[in-house]
Amino acid sequence: MKPDINLLITEITFKTSRSGGSGGQNVNKVSTKVELNFDVTNSQHLDEHQKEIIQIKLFNKMTTEGILQIISQVERSQLGNKKVVISKFKELIETSFKVQKKRKETKVPFAVKEKRLLTKKRKAEIKKMRKVDF
């Protein structure tokens, strides 16, 4: 069961700082880089099973304290980066609770086996023709 994302958004904290890279004077004086922090371990709206799933699937985006961090500095405005970070957060939560289908094992078709054996025979005959008996 996946959690309600709108409830999780209420537990998000944002931190802003100055972006790096090109942008002229705007980069030097405006804090446009946005960092989203979501405390998974202390979340009120997640049960233990959901917390465990998020920690397993998103471990590379989490700190050792169990805080999920997402950073964006692609937009030139703070509001734009905030929107990007929130959409990334929603996408990550959605994909972490998505159940993958089991793969059905299939047999190799008879025609494929036959073709492989025929090519092997042809290669063997070509190599046999190259040999010269003295």
Image (cartoon, helix red, strand yellow):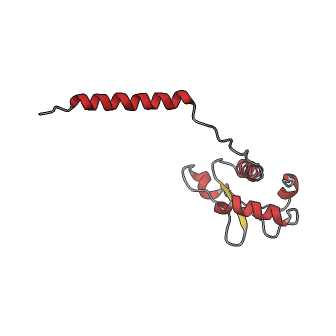
Along the line of sight, the residue nearer the viewer: 116 or 25: 116
Q: Determine the image quadrant of residue 15.
A: bottom right
Along the line of sight, the residue nearer the viewer: 85 or 18: 85
> Left of 31 or right of it: where is 6?
right
Q: Could you tell me if residue 84 is visible in this image?
A: yes
Residue at left 87%, top 53%?
A: 4
Q: Could you tell me if residue 14 is visible in this image?
A: no
Count of numbered labels shown in the rendering: 0
Residue reaching furthest bottom?
Answer: 65
Residue reaching furthest front?
Answer: 134
> Left of 120 or right of it: where is 85?
right
> Left of 49 or right of it: where is 19?
left
Image coordinates of residue 102 in percent, x first then y, are 71, 46
Image coordinates of residue 28 in percent, x first then y, are 59, 57
Along the line of sight, the residue nearer the viewer: 64 or 76: 64
Which quadrant, please, contains the C terminus? top left
Residue at left 83%, top 66%?
A: 48
Image coordinates of residue 38 in percent, x first then y, are 77, 63
Image coordinates of residue 128 in percent, x first then y, are 26, 31
Along the line of sight, the residue nearer the viewer: 129 or 3: 129
